[in-house]
Amino acid sequence: MRGGPRMPRVNELLREVIAEEVRTLKDPAIGFVTITGVDTSPDLRTANVFYTALGTEEERAETAAALRRATPHIQSRLGAQVRIKYTPALDFRVDESIETGMRIDALLREIEHDDES
């Protein structure tokens, strides 16, 4: 396990705080966003924040840009709420696992349909 048994707890705590902060943002460019996970480096210096966003490709691009703009604010709020040695630098990344899962599911259904034919 990367970073030992403490890291999953740290990651979940950061995910919860970041998700709450994203919900409170007033930027209209941020659409419906779900923070799906956080992967913090073992030294607590950086954290990849995975999210999903609904909408068209253009709306999702606007959401990504708005999250980048809001990163300093979210980091400062994170530092004020979470007591860990360092406040990690946040890097927001699109979580493609849901889309990949849906694509795999569609392929499996297609194979199943072909087998029935």
Image: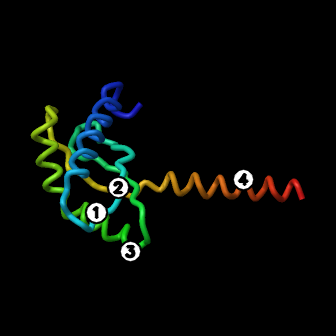
Query: How far is the residue under mark 3 from the one under mark 2?
Result: 14 Å
Nearest the eye: 35 or 31: 31
User: Contact (CB < 8 A) between labels 4 and 3?
Assistant: no
Nearer-N-terminus badge (3/2): 2
Q: Which residue is mark 3?
A: 58
User: Contact (CB < 8 A) between labels 1 and 4?
Assistant: no
Query: How far is the residue under mark 4 from the one under mark 2?
Result: 28 Å
Query: How far is the residue under mark 1 from the one under mark 2?
Result: 7 Å
Nearer-N-terminus badge (4/2): 2
30 up-or-down from 24: above or below: below
- Label placed on residue 105: none
* Tag 4 secondary structure: helix
Query: How far is the residue under mark 1 from the one under mark 4?
Result: 33 Å
Q: Residues within 10 Å of mark 1 (few under 14, many from 20)?
A: many
Nearer-N-terminus badge (1/3): 1
Relative horizontal placement of residue 106, taking residue 42 as reference (left or right): right
Which amino acid is tagged 4? Leu
Relative horizontal placement of residue 110, taking residue 77 as reference (left or right): right
User: Contact (CB < 8 A) between labels 1 and 3?
Assistant: no
Q: Residue at x 12, y 41 (%)?
A: 79
Q: Which residue is mark 4?
A: 108
Which amino acid is tagged 3? Glu
Nearer-N-terminus badge (4/3): 3
Query: How far is the residue under mark 1 from the one under mark 3?
Result: 12 Å
Q: Nearer the viewer, mark 4 or mark 3?
A: 3
Which amino acid is tagged 2? Val
* Tag 2 secondary structure: strand
* Tag 3 secondary structure: helix
Nearest the eye: 26 or 95: 26
Q: Which residue is mark 2?
A: 33
Q: Which residue is mark 1?
A: 30
Q: Residues within 10 Å of mark 2 (few under 14, many from 20)?
A: some
